[in-house]
């Protein structure tokens, strides 16, 4: 369900779907109705549940407050459109530590994607209840995906280095689909030289913000856990992690 408020100029919805109207007024004193000229396009219940029909085009809903003597009424414009395309918005904001743009995402990063529906003019539509959203990465070993809001919101953790392509589509209409390329690389140790025991290493985070570095085992002695300065004390492989900007980036060295 999508809950638009009455301040938006127009509510844009798809055909054959439902949305729940909500206002700042008490629900118990509201009366909803549809002008007769739009009755073939949508209907509304006493509780404000709007049901659109198969006919596209403009419509309107009348919202009247019944407890006031001045007959306070609002006309809510509605546009009913067919879904023309799917789009993906990245909700996660990333502040980089340098001015150089990232060509890949760092291993360990968590991003949130939101799927939106657009009409033929590219305008966003309220999430339709009649669409069945599916998703599938072509590799399952590189990511961890948690879906919510009927699969329209995906929280993705890039847990290993590599590249995968994520397909998102409408099972009710497979021609509505979008592909997202996800590429992750280890970024915490930038030197190409293989480190040796007793080396002093400066790990760096691609993300800006207060950092705290840690590692497993006894291979690394941290000289400064906030700036990423460390000395290698034992041979072997160490798993290094930095917590920064509500992210947990990782690498293996």
Image: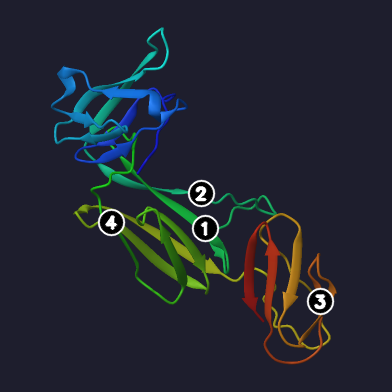
- Return the residue at label 2: 91
Task: Look at discs 2 and 3 and give the one toward the viewer.
Answer: 2
Give residue 158's mark.
Answer: none
Disc nearer the start of the sequence (2/3): 2
Instruction: Residue 120: give x, y in percent of width and height.
Output: 25, 35
Disc nearer the start of the sequence (1/3): 1
Q: Secondary structure at mark 2?
A: loop
Q: Are marks 4 and 3 in contact (CB under 8 Å)?
A: no
Rendered position, 181 above or below 117: below
Q: Quadrant of residue 3?
A: top left
- The answer for how far apart the CA atoms under marks 2 and 3 are is 34 Å
- Return the residue at label 3: 230
Q: Quadrant of residue 8?
A: top left
Rendered position, 76 above or below 51: above
- The answer for how far apart the CA atoms under marks 1 and 4 are is 19 Å
Instruction: Residue 66: give x, y in percent of width and height.
Output: 37, 17
Disc nearer the start of the sequence (4/3): 4
Disc nearer the start of the sequence (1/4): 1
Q: Residue furthest bottom?
A: 235
């Amino acid at each position: 369900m999508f809950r638009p408020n009455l301040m938006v100029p127009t509510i844009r919805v798809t055909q054959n779907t439902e949305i729940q109207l909500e206002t700042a007024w008490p629900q118990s004193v509201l009366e909803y109705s549809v002008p007769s000229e739009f009755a073939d396009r949508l209907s509304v219940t006493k509780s404000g549940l709007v049901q659109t029909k198969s006919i596209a085009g403009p419509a309107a809903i009348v919202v009247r407050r019944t407890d006031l003597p001045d007959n306070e009424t609002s006309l809510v414009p509605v546009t009913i459109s067919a879904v023309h395309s799917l789009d993906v918005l990245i909700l996660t904001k990333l502040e980089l530590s340098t001015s150089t743009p990232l060509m890949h995402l760092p291993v360990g990063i968590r991003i949130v994607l939101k799927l939106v529906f657009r009409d033929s003019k590219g305008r966003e539509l309220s999430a339709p209840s009649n669409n069945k959203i599916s998703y599938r990465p072509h590799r399952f070993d590189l990511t961890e995906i948690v879906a919510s809001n009927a699969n329209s919101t995906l929280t993705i953790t890039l847990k290993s280095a590599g590249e995968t392509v994520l397909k998102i589509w409408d099972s009710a209409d497979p021609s509505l689909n979008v592909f997202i390329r996800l590429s992750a690389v280890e970024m915490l140790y930038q030197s190409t030289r293989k480190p040796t025991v007793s080396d002093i290493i400066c790990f760096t985070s691609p993300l800006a913000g207060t950092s705290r570095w840690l590692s497993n085992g006894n291979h690394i002695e941290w000289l400064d856990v906030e700036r990423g300065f460390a000395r290698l004390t034992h041979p072997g492989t160490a798993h290094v992690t930095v917590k920064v900007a509500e992210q947990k980036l990782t690498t293996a060295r």
